[in-house]
Image (cartoon, grey):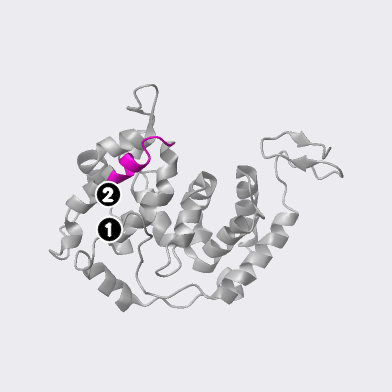
């Protein structure tokens, strides 16, 4: 990574180490994937970066290989010991695969201004996190919020639903210009920069309450609702593997049929 652009406390490693230790403690008795929804917003709020800085893979390589390899082993380990990690890319890899960068970018792309609530929702569903995160349409904030609203309203429930919804949204994006159909507002760059440079100056992040992100502007609700309605209509006719459209049958989410009896 290039030399930091400043010598502020945002580059201190101590708060990150404490955050990862707390995550492992809190979810010691749970499935490690459960830690994603808790960790993502707090990682983003603790490690305050510009998108340019977050695009530097050497930062994430350092965290994964030097600062917190024990967390990577805990989160992605398998087998009885939990120490064997199947993919080296979880330590040092592509932004949407590496253990920590995927969570930071999920928080950045799914947050609604200062509200990290949508981030918890997105990272609590591994299908959303693994499928939606790597699509180009997620760069459009109303699109990101619309896809989450489908989940929140139980329009999409299973992993197959998520894959189908993302597929039709991507396909429709070829002909529909989402930026024109559901315009976003320009984010406040000054507010974001002030938030970044204020790292370490305010109270410590509370582990039991959701932190607040930068006050750089919320997603226009009307735009998010427009796309939610659009995606719901598209999804209604989307092919979903294992989904029985015949009368008297329904999809159970595991590929089997429920006769309705």
Q: Residue furthest left?
A: 7
Q: Quadrant of the C terminus?
A: top right
In the rendered image of this protein, does residue 142 appear above or below residue 237? below
User: In this figure, what is the number of numbered marks?
Assistant: 2
Q: Residue at x 36, y 36 (%)?
A: 28
In the rendered image of this protein, does residue 109 appear above or below residue 24? below
**Residue topped by disc 2:** 19
Which callout, 1 or 2, points at the residue further toward the start of the chain?
Answer: 2
Q: Position of residue 256 (x, y in %)?
A: 73, 33
Residue 210 visible in the current orientation: yes
**Residue topped by disc 1:** 46
Q: Residue at x 46, y 55 (%)?
A: 120
Magenta-highlighted residues: 22-30
Q: Which labelled disc corresponds to residue 166?
A: none
Q: Is residue 184 magenta?
A: no
Q: From the viewer's perspective, is 114 left or right of 135?
A: left
Residue 177 visible in the current orientation: no
Q: Position of residue 153 (x, y in %)?
A: 63, 59
Q: Position of residue 221 (x, y in %)?
A: 56, 74
In the rendered image of this protein, does residue 221 appear above or below residue 245? below
Q: Residue at x 35, y 66 (%)?
A: 213
Q: Residue furthest top?
A: 80
Q: Residue at x 72, y 51 (%)?
A: 238
Q: Residue furthest right?
A: 247
Q: Position of residue 205 (x, y in %)?
A: 28, 59
Q: Residues within 10 Å of mark 2 (few under 14, many from 20)?
A: some
């Amino acid at each position: 990574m290039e030399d930091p652009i400043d010598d502020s406390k945002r580059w201190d490693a101590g708060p990150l180490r404490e955050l990862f230790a707390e995550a492992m403690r809190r979810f010691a008795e749970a499935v490690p994937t459960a830690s994603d929804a808790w960790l993502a917003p707090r990682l983003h709020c603790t490690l305050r970066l510009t998108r340019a800085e977050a695009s530097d893979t050497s930062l994430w390589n350092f965290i994964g290989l030097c600062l917190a390899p024990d967390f990577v082993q805990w989160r992605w380990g398998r087998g009885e010991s939990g120490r064997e990690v199947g993919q080296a890319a979880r330590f040092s890899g592509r932004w949407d695969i590496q253990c920590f960068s995927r969570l930071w970018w999920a928080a950045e792309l799914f947050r609604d201004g200062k509200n990290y609530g949508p981030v918890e929702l997105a990272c609590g569903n591994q299908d959303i996190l693994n499928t939606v995160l790597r699509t180009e349409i997620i760069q459009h904030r109303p699109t990101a919020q619309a896809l989450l609203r489908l989940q929140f309203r139980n329009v999409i429930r299973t992993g197959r639903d998520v894959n189908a919804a993302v597929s039709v949204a991507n396909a429709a994006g070829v002909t529909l210009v989402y930026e024109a159909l559901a315009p976003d507002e320009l984010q406040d760059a000054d507010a974001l920069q002030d938030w970044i440079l204020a790292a370490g100056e305010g109270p410590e992040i509370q582990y039991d309450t959701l932190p607040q992100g930068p006050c750089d502007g919320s997603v226009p609700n009307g735009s998010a609702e427009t796309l939610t309605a659009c995606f719901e209509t598209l999804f209604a006719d989307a092919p979903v593997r294992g989904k029985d459209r015949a009368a008297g049958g329904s999809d159970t989410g595991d590929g089997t049929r429920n006769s309705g009896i």
